[in-house]
Amino acid sequence: MHEISVLTKAVELVESVARDNGLDHVSFITLEVGELTGYVPLFFEKYFPVVTEDKPVFEGTELRIQTVRGQALCQECQSLYNVMRNEGRCPKCGSREKKILGGQQFLVKEIGY
């Protein structure tokens, strides 16, 4: 369960940004999570209260998660497709040769105050 350690790092980053900018409260955090990271957004939601416990800056903070689809370009036929939905295989020609275009990112997209 890598979500806890990644979420902890994200919370530490947001806490640092809040401190550096003189903020005493963060109203929301938006995480952008790619489908191809292997992270389960439900676990971020579940463990956010645990990771932010005893951190006053996060009292009442809303966690928002935006999922980014795992998109790829087939190297054989140049079709654009969703990697997860098609189990890594191009739906047009069946090739597994692809260039990943999106869905591998995990980032703190937005901090609301």
Image (cartoon, rainbow, N blue to C red):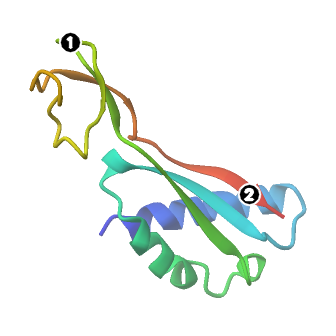
Q: Nearer the viewer, residue 47 or 83?
A: 83
- Residue where numbered disc 1 is placed: 77
Q: Residue placed at 20% from the left, 12% from the top?
A: 77
* Residue 109 higher or lower than 2, as above or below: above
Residue type marked 1 = Cys
Q: Quadrant of the C terminus?
A: bottom right
Figure quadrant of residue 78: top left
* 97 sits left or right of 105 in the view: left
Q: Residue furthest bottom?
A: 54
Q: Quadrant of the N terminus?
A: bottom left
Point out the frontmost of discs 2 and 1: 1
* Residue 18 higher or lower than 96, as above or below: below
Find residue 81 and report its horizontal and vertical position in percent: 30, 31
The reply to whether the C-beta atoms of the residues labelled 2 and 1 are less than 8 Å apart is no
Separation of marks 2 and 1 at Cα, in angstroms: 40 Å
Find residue 46 and report its horizontal and vertical position in percent: 46, 80
Q: Crowding at label 2, few (<14), some or many (≥20) Cα neighbours within 10 Å?
A: some
Find residue 79 and report its horizontal and vertical position in percent: 28, 19
Q: Residue placed at 90% from the left, 62% from the top?
A: 22
- Residue where numbered disc 2 is placed: 111
Q: Residue placed at 63% from the left, 58% from the top?
A: 30
Q: Residue placed at 35% from the left, 40% from the top?
A: 70
Residue 61 image label: none
* 64 sits left or right of 79 in the view: right
* Residue 22 higher or lower than 61, as above or below: above
Residue type marked 2 = Ile
Q: How many marks can you see?
A: 2
Find residue 49 and report its horizontal and vertical position in percent: 56, 83
Whichever of callouts 2 and 1 sits on the residue coming sooner in the sequence is 1
Secondary element at tag 1: loop
Secondary element at tag 2: strand
